[in-house]
Image (cartoon, rainbow, N blue to C red):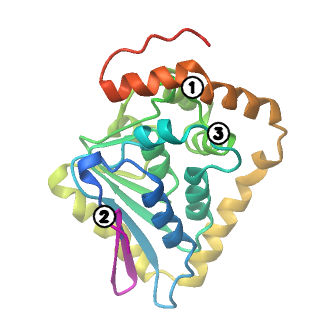
Amino acid sequence: MSERVRVDVAGPVKTVTLTRPEKRNAMDTAMLDALYAVFTEAPAPADRLIVLRAEGSTYCSGVDLKERLALGVMSGESPVERVFHAMETHPLPIVTVVEGAAIAGGCELALHCEFVVASEDAHFGMSLAQVGLAPTWFLAKKLMEVAGPVGTREILLLGDLMPAQWMHERGLIARVAPKDQLEAEVKKIVDRLSGNAPLSLKAMKAMIVRQLAFRDGVAHDDVDALVQAARKSDDSKEGMSARLEKRKPNFSGT
C-alpha cells in the first residue's frame, strides 16, 4: 500500500504494520495519509479486527519533527488528529502490539486502539512539554478517558516515559507480557475477537465511543488558543530543534 505502511490479510485479521524503522516509525505526511486510507476503508464482510504493529525497536516516536519544523503550524484539523479520529470511529476493534517506545503521537496512536498489548520492556509517554508543544483538545480527551485526571497530569505535565507495567497497573493498557510471551498474549485476544459475533462487536465499539463523546460539546476555544500559542512559539522551535540535535533546550517562555 505504501512504503510507510504494509497491510496483510489472513482470514478475519487485517494486520497493519508501520514500516519506517530507520526513522523510529516517526509519522510523516506519507505515513499519516496511508494510515488514514486504511482506517477509513470499509471493512470486508469477512474482516473481524485489525492488528496494528511496527517494525524495528521503536513502536512509534510520534510526529516527524524534522518535517513538522519544515511545514510549520497548520490550521484546522491536524493530519494526526484526522487519523486518530478515523481509528476511533472505525467499525472494527483494533489490537496493537507495542515493543520499544511509544512516544507523544506514538503513545496516542496506541491508546486509540481498543486493546494495547505491550512487551514488559516497552515504554509510553507524551514528551510534548519537553519540546514546547501541547496536545489538542481531542488528544487530551483520549488521555482523560483512559488515564483519568491524576494519570493525565503525570503523563502530560512531566512528559517522562512510563514503563508498560505502570500503564497496565493504572488500566491504560490491556496486557503486559515478557518479550518471549508477547505473541501468545496477542493471539489470545485475536482468537477471542475473531470468534465473537461481528455485529455485536461493531455495536459495542460504536456504543462505547458515543458514550465517551460527552467532552466534545464542552466549550474549549480558549484552550485551543493556548495550544496554538504554544505551537507557534519560539520555544516550540527551540524544543524540536534541541530534540533533533540531542541537546537540552533553552526555553525562554516566548
- Cβ–Cβ under 8 Å for marks 3 and 1: no
* Residue type of the residue flagged with mark 3: Thr
In the rendered image of this protein, does residue 83 appear above or below residue 205? above
Q: Residue furthest front?
A: 70
User: Do we see residue 171 in this rendering?
Assistant: no
Which mark sits nearer the N-terminus, 2 or 3? 3
Q: Which residues are magenta?
A: 1-15
Secondary structure at numbered mark 2: helix
Q: Could you say where residue 155 lies in the image, as x and y percent from the top left? A: 49, 29
According to the image, label 3 marks what residue? Answer: 136
According to the image, label 1 marks what residue? Answer: 153
According to the image, label 2 marks what residue? Answer: 186
Viewport quadrant of the N terminus: bottom left
Report which quarter residue 188 is drawn in: bottom left
Rendered residue at 39%/77% (across/down): 14
- Relative depth, front residue between 21 and 186: 21
Q: Could you say where residue 113 lies in the image, as x and y percent from the top left? A: 49, 58
Of the residues tagged 3 and 1, which is closer to the observer?
A: 3
User: Do we see residue 156 in this rendering?
Assistant: yes
